Image (cartoon, rainbow, N blue to C red):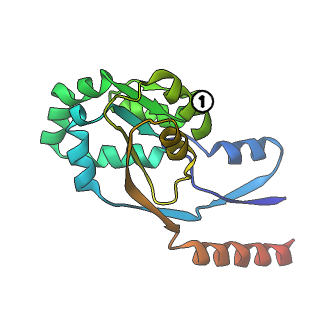
Amino acid sequence: MQVLLLKEPRDGASGPDPYIKELASHGLSATLIPVLSFKFVSLNTLSDKLFQPEKHGGLIFTSPRAVEAVKICLEAEERREEWDRSVKEKWNAKSVYVVGKATAALVRNLGLNPLGEDTGTAEILSRVIIEREDTNIPPLFFPCGSIKREVLPSALRENGMPLETLTVYQTAEHPDLDKNLKNYFTVQSASAFVT
């Protein structure tokens, strides 16, 4: 039996996608077709904010894409050197919150110490932040996507927690989605006649 997975490939994963691997262990053949694409935006503003940690009470990352945007900002050698020399330690003196193990791993790759990787959802992370932080801190900085859910920002604001959000990536349909789906179904139709 053939299974079609409409999802993004796992970021930074070595070997086959875990879903494909699991399906194969049950004798199923799977094809993965990505459905989304991401465009990074506001990177100059993001870079400026990253290099002014004194203006923020901490960082919040709820997606691997937001961390990827930070990584792009650090690609210039002089920026990376400044980051490694002093800026990351200034952020590490504050709280750096994350949702999920994948996001936490990427944050560690930036040299930052994540908190909350076991929370699993923005709702649970917001409770952790509210319990840990004082409302008198400078705003927490939250680089995010264009279609983020409002769970975390709403919970923090309702509890008087200062927050500054910045959209750093936009989500859209993958440009090759139609073509990839047509190719997949053409191959499936052809193989149905062969068997």
Q: Which one is in front, 192 or 50?
A: 50
- Against 22, residue 172 (above or below) is below
Is residue 147 shown left or right of residue 20?
left
> In this rendering, does residue 121 appear at all?
no
- Percent of width and height locating residue 167: 39, 56
Q: Relative to residue 3, is residue 79 drawn left or right?
A: left
Q: Is residue 12 left or right of residue 17?
A: left
Q: Is residue 170 above or below residue 150?
A: below
Residue depicted at 34% across the width and 29% down the height:
137
Depth check, front residue: 164 or 7: 164
Q: Is residue 65 visible?
A: yes
Residue 177's x, y, as percent?
Answer: 58, 72
Q: Which residue is mark 1?
A: 119
Location of the C terminus by quadrant is bottom right
Question: Circle 1 sits in a helix, a strand or a loop, which is it?
Answer: loop
Give x and y (percent) for residue 33. Answer: 62, 63
Residue at position x 32%, y 27% in the image: 111
Q: Residues within 10 Å of mark 1 (few under 14, many from 20)?
A: some
Q: Quadrant of the N terminus?
A: bottom right
